[in-house]
Image (cartoon, rainbow, N blue to C red):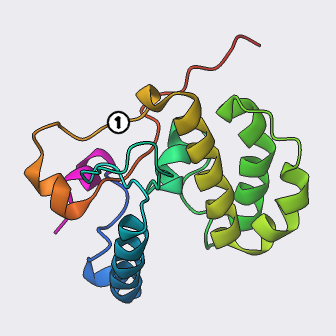
Amino acid sequence: MKRECDAFYPEPFSCLHKVNSNMVPMTFHGMRMLDRLWAAGCAVPPLKSTNGDATVLLETMPGAVLRVFKLPFKGYKNGANAMELRRRILDGLPKRSGLSLPNLDEYRDICMSSHDGLDAVVAAIAAALWVIDSGMFRHPPASGETVQLEGWLYAPAFIDLPAS
C-alpha cells in the first residue's frame, strides 16, 4: 500500500512496504511524537489546525527535493558511488536550491559520512523554501479525507531559480 501522496513520487516504497520493515517502528514512533507536538500547539499540514500562527512541521522527502533540484536523488545513501553522489549533491545545493547556504561547509563532513545527515540538510533547505514560498510545493486536494489520516509529503513541485 502507498499513501495518496506517494503516487507523486514513483521511486520510493511506502513507509509501510515490506522492504521498509525498519520504517514501521520509526513511522509509529514518529506518529506518537507528532501527536505530542500537535497537542503542544504545532501546525502539521495538511492536518486541520486551530493553532493559528504556530510553528509548522513538514514531512519532507529529501529524494524528491533533490530530484526537483536536478541533483542525484538515487544511490546517494548506499552503493559504490554514494560518496561521489553526496559530493555532487553538496556542491550543487546552493545553486540548485536558489538559497545562500554560507555555512554548508560546516556540515560537509557529517553529510559525507551519513546519508541521514545529508537528508537533514536537504529537509532544512525544503523548510526554508516553504517559508519563502509554500506555493512552489505540491499540496494535497482540499477535499482529501484520506490525507487527513495519512498526512502528506512536501517537496517543491518546481523551483524558480533566478537567472545566473
The percent position of residue 78, horizontal first and vertical second, equals 61, 73
Q: Is residue 85 left or right of residue 10?
A: right
> Residue at 11% of width from left, 56% of height from top?
146
* Secondary element at tag 1: loop
The percent position of residue 17, horizontal first and vertical second, equals 26, 77
Q: Which residue is mark 1?
A: 138
Where the N terminus falls, by quadrant? bottom left
> Residue at 87% of width from left, 67% of height from top?
109
Above/below status of 109 relative to 55: below
Which of these two is toward me, 130 or 93?
130
Q: Is residue 54 magenta?
A: no
| Amino acid type, mark 1 | Arg
The percent position of residue 140, horizontal first and vertical second, equals 24, 41
Q: Quadrant of residue 131?
A: top right
The percent position of residue 22, horizontal first and vertical second, equals 41, 87
User: Where are the magenta residues, as a range?
Assistant: 1-9
| Residue 93 makes an appearance in the image | yes
Q: Is residue 155 left or right of residue 71?
A: left
